[in-house]
């Protein structure tokens, strides 16, 4: 006998203003907010407006979490799952069953120094159908924490370790030397990320690991920097990142080459840097803002970039792993849109996210040409990490 369709009326989510037909946490809260609340417990967010009073519907994670927390305490509910055995939950269970073998395979791996507690990934499997995205989110956070600590600790005047731990640290204007060191740190953490996130990556030989990592680095650096700049400088479109703690601005350009050991045409290099900054930074920031990647979409894009191995000189094993993980991440994106966001027609949004990967690839090519030009001016050399990678 066919299951009768739900006759529940649509209601506005008390947190984000979206539409929900199902009670979650015993209240009119949508599933997307419920999942966000569950995943965000124990995390420290910073209010984008610095007011802790962002309007309903604004994408400030701190205010969104605080509203959810207040509602949960007010209702006396500690249950962050749906209180309703609706068609949505039946669909979720069906999708989980379909993906169970892949989920098991992905989470059965040795513990590593970058994975202090892998049980949280395994325990989340019965609750939602995106185990790879969840896992990569954890590993990306570790990568960010490592970049942060290493960049700040390598400075001549490092902040107190407690300030680093609390993320109450200064941001520094980028210079040639600090940028070069930041890129070395970034490449090392990507290698660690690859081993911790993808079991197959650990089996590749050193040449293949380096090929995959450097290919990813050239694509991901501007994407990651733009994503974080939009979170850190939401009201200042004239700033960007070129390291985890290094800010690039027009003012910073004037002193970028002060600590550069290479003898070259610094005046012309500074002019080229300034022209590129004026031409590219704001359009790139605006493009990132138009897309407005949710965290899960950002992580899925990260995975797609990591496994963009087309045209690389790699073994069939690398190609097979690439195809496998891209297939899985696309499947989980479908599940995320259907189950977590409860979107029925998400094809356009998925297309936007995937097309932006092509934009990132184009930017990577433009950046390589920029570095080659700086190499001709003898300010960048083989000792410059980013430049050397363009000549591999």
Image: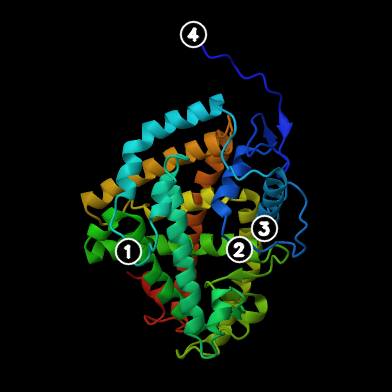
Q: Residue at x 56, y 59 (%)?
A: 42
Quadrant of res 11? top right
Please tell me which of labels 4 and 3 falls first in the chain: 4
Q: Which mark is residue 112?
A: 1
Quadrant of the snapshot with the C terminus: bottom left
Residue 289 as seen in the image, left or right of residue 135: right
| Separation of marks 2 and 1 at Cα, in angstroms | 25 Å
Q: What residue would you read off at disc 3? A: 62
Residue 44, numbered label: 2
Tag 4, which secondary structure?
A: loop
Vertical order, 143 against 174 (above or below): above
* Dot 1 crowding, Cα within 10 Å, few <14, some 14–19, many 20+: few
Locate residue 185: give its quadrant. bottom left
Give the distance between the C-alpha atoms of the residues marked 4 and 1, in whole angstroms: 50 Å
Give residue 135's position: percent from left, percent from top: 42, 52
N-terminal-most mark, 3 or 1: 3
Label 2 or label 4, whichever comes before in sequence order: 4
Q: Position of residue 124 (x, y in %)?
A: 44, 46
Q: Is residue 214 above or below residue 357?
A: below
Residue 94 percent coordinates (x, y)? 43, 28
User: At 57% from the left edge and 54% from the top edge, which residue is drawn?
Assistant: 40
Q: CA distance from mark 3 to mark 2?
A: 8 Å
Q: CA distance from mark 3 to mark 1?
A: 31 Å
């Amino acid at each position: 006998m066919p299951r009768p369709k739900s006759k529940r009326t649509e209601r506005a989510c008390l947190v984000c203003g979206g539409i929900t037909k199902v009670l979650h946490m015993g209240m009119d809260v949508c599933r997307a907010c419920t999942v966000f609340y569950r995943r965000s417990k124990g995390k420290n967010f910073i209010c984008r407006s610095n007011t802790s009073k962002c309007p309903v519907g604004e994408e400030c994670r701190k205010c969104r979490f605080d509203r959810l927390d207040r509602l949960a305490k007010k209702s006396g509910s500690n249950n962050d799952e749906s209180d309703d055995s609706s068609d949505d939950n039946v669909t979720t269970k069906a999708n989980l069953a379909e993906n169970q073998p892949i989920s098991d395979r992905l989470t059965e791996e040795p513990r590593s120094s970058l994975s202090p507690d892998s049980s949280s990934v395994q325990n989340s499997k019965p609750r939602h159908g995106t185990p790879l995205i969840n896992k990569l989110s954890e590993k990306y956070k570790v990568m960010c924490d490592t970049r942060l600590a290493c960049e700040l600790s390598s400075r001549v005047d490092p902040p107190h370790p407690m300030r680093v731990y609390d993320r109450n640290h200064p941001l520094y204007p980028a210079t040639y030397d600090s940028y070069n060191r930041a890129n070395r740190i970034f490449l090392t953490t990507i290698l660690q990320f690859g081993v911790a996130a993808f079991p197959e990556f650990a089996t590749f030989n050193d040449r293949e690991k380096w090929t995959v990592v450097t290919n990813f680095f050239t694509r991901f650096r501007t994407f990651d920097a733009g994503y974080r700049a939009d979170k850190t400088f939401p009201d200042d479109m004239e700033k960007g990142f070129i390291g985890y703690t290094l800010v690039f601005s027009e003012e910073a350009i004037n002193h970028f080459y002060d600590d550069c050991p290479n003898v070259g045409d610094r005046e012309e290099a500074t002019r080229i840097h300034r022209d590129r900054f004026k031409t590219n930074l704001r359009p790139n920031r605006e493009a990132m803002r138009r897309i407005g990647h949710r965290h899960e979409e950002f992580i899925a894009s990260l995975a797609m970039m990591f496994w963009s191995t087309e045209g690389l000189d790699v073994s069939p094993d690398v190609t097979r792993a690439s195809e496998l993980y891209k297939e899985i991440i696309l499947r989980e994106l479908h599940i995320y849109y259907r189950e977590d966001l409860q979107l029925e027609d998400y094809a356009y949004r998925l297309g936007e996210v995937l097309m932006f990967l092509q934009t990132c690839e184009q930017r990577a090519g433009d950046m390589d040409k920029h570095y080659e030009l700086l190499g001709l001016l003898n300010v960048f050399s083989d000792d410059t990490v980013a430049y050397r990678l363009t000549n591999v």
